[in-house]
Amino acid sequence: MSKVKLISIIYAIGIIIGALFFEVWAAETSFIKTIGVFIWTIIFLIALFFADKNEKK
């Protein structure tokens, strides 16, 4: 399994956990939860960039 697929699966699991257990998409979502989702996405994009960069070498 490539690193890009593994990172994508981990990201999707994190989003699902955030939606189900932390109620990120609830009607009364706080600013902290929203920032948490943005930080999770930024970490995903950085990891995806480095994984893709290392696969091309």
Image: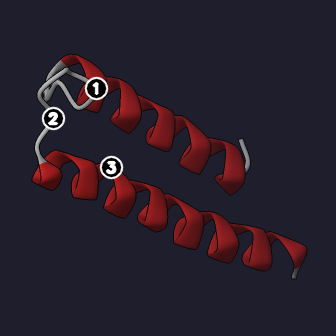
Residue 41 spot, x, y in % from top left: 46, 56
Task: Say the numbered circle drawn on residue 11.
Answer: none
Distance between mark 2 and mark 3 Cα atoms: 11 Å
- Height in image: 36 above or below 11? below
SS state under label 2 = loop
For label 2, count other residues whose C-alpha is less than 10 Å away and answer few (under 14), some (14-19) or many (20+). Answer: few
**Which residue appears at 24% of the width and 54% of the height?**
36
- Height in image: 27 above or below 56? above
Q: Which residue is mark 2?
A: 29
For label 1, count other residues whose C-alpha is less than 10 Å away and answer few (under 14), some (14-19) or many (20+). Answer: few
**Which residue appears at 25% of the width and 58% of the height?**
35
Distance between mark 2 and mark 1 Cα atoms: 7 Å
Report the quarter where the C terminus lies. bottom right
Which is nearer the eye, 14 or 34?
A: 34
The mark nearer the N terminus, 1 or 3, is 1
Distance between mark 1 and mark 3 Cα atoms: 10 Å
**Which residue appears at 11% of the width and 27% of the height?**
28
**Which residue appears at 67% of the width and 72% of the height?**
49
Q: Which residue is mark 3?
A: 37
Which is nearer the eye, 25 or 18?
A: 25
Cβ–Cβ below 8 Å for labels 2 and 1?
yes
Task: Please state which amino acid type lies under the numbered disc 3.
Answer: Val
20 left or right, relative to 7? left
SS state under label 1 = loop
Residue furthest to the bottom: 57
Residue 45 spot, x, y in % from top left: 57, 64
For label 3, count other residues whose C-alpha is less than 10 Å away and answer few (under 14), some (14-19) or many (20+). Answer: some
Task: Please state which amino acid type lies under the numbered disc 2.
Answer: Thr
Residue 3 spot, x, y in % from top left: 66, 55
